[in-house]
Image (spheres, helix red, strand yellow):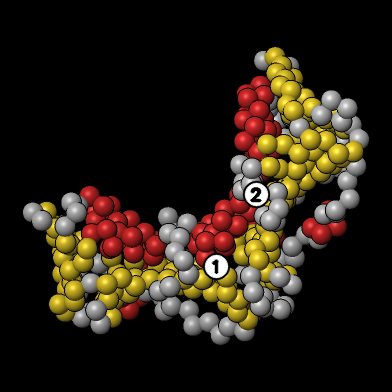
Amino acid sequence: MKFSINKNEFLNALGIAGKGIASRSTIPVLSGVYIKTLGTSLELKGTDSERAIRCTVSALIDEDGECVVPERLLYDIVKSFPDAAITMDVDETQALISCDKTSFTLKVFDPADFPAFPDIDVNTKASISFKAFSQAVKRVAKVVSKDQGRPALTGVLITTIPDGMRLVATDSYRLAMDDIPCENPTEGFEALVSGSFMQEVASLPEKEESIEICLSANHVVFTYGSIVFINRRIEARFPNYQQLLTDSYTTRTEFDTAGILAAVRRVGLMSSLSAPIKFDIESSTATALLSTVSQDMGSAEESLSCGVEGENIEIALNHQYVVDGLSSIPTDKVFLETRTSMMPGIFRAQDPERFLYLLMPVRI
């Protein structure tokens, strides 16, 4: 097997295939990237047995073949090369990688030991703008739990709604939801997918094209151009989040998004897990007083002008969770909807965006 390839294109393809490779594996061949010639292209694959990724990249093929090379080392080698053509010459035991005046020799794995790429029998499909999908994932997936003992909370729920697609995630303390408008959404489409896996998909370069999401009984398949991501669906029941969402409120407060985010970050310098930020909203003066008290360090407060509809209210929220939510708001204005100090507060983006971020209050 022998081929030549542009450095940056090869590096990008290795980075994509590498997203499917576990950082640690007891099976040596799974630490490698599978490379095979396909006409005028290379096919690269990576897997950790739970997920699998495949992509293609153009190359000048001198001799057909296949190999499995240690992915992390190959990636670092290619990254270290100057911006010039790279040549890779592989036999049964080793790969010679050359660029300009530099060359490396790497031992290779037997490609026969590399797992076959999953052949998934899909039963449901949906297609949506990748740009809109990527933005929604980045807003929503940041709230997934890292507690593997509660698998439902480690995933993002993908469902279709009458006019689009909905992404929802929660760690039981907060919930993020984004609705993406699209034409002719697929009815009955629903899957719970690993949040970290979806973040890997969303990290791909944005192009003006759609991503196709396909479901089988046990897997989800994302296809974006020549790139295919496959992962097992999470077999757990997602919480009944809809009972927490309501359009009714006793107070609706309008903030400038950049202003409230900056204020929360400033006041939060004195905050901690035991010292949440308190929002004291006064309708008669159209102000919101943000404050926190730390027994060990001191206190901080800041008053903000805002638009207030409804009653006065005090509500305390986790500082870092508020920052996470506000930093995801894609509009210039944000609305905080509240009912009582012990009921969830909901931050909503300005129309036409349909992102919301729900926070459980902290007792004060």
The spot of residue 354 in percent (x, y) is 70, 56
Q: Quadrant of the N terminus?
A: bottom left
Would you name the residue on which mark 1 appears? 129
**Is residue 290 visible in this depiction of the protein?**
no
Q: Quadrant of the C terminus?
A: top right
Q: Is residue 65 above or below residue 20?
A: below
Q: Are marks 2 and 1 in contact (CB under 8 Å)?
A: no
Q: Is residue 44 above or below residue 21?
A: below
* Labelled disc at residue 143: 2
Q: Is residue 347 above or below residue 362?
A: below
The residue positioned 67% from the left and 30% from the top of the image is 264
Amino acid type at image mark 1: Ser
* CA neighbours of label 1 inside 10 A, class few (<14), some (14 to 19), many (20+): some
The residue positioned 67% from the left and 55% from the top of the image is 353
In terms of depth relative to the viewer, which is nearer, 65 or 283? 283
Amino acid type at image mark 2: Val
The spot of residue 105 in percent (x, y) is 16, 60
Residue 135: name its quadrant.
Answer: bottom right
Residue 281: name its quadrant.
Answer: top right
The spot of residue 266 in percent (x, y) is 63, 25
Cα separation between marks 2 and 1 = 23 Å
**Is residue 318 visible in this depiction of the protein?**
yes
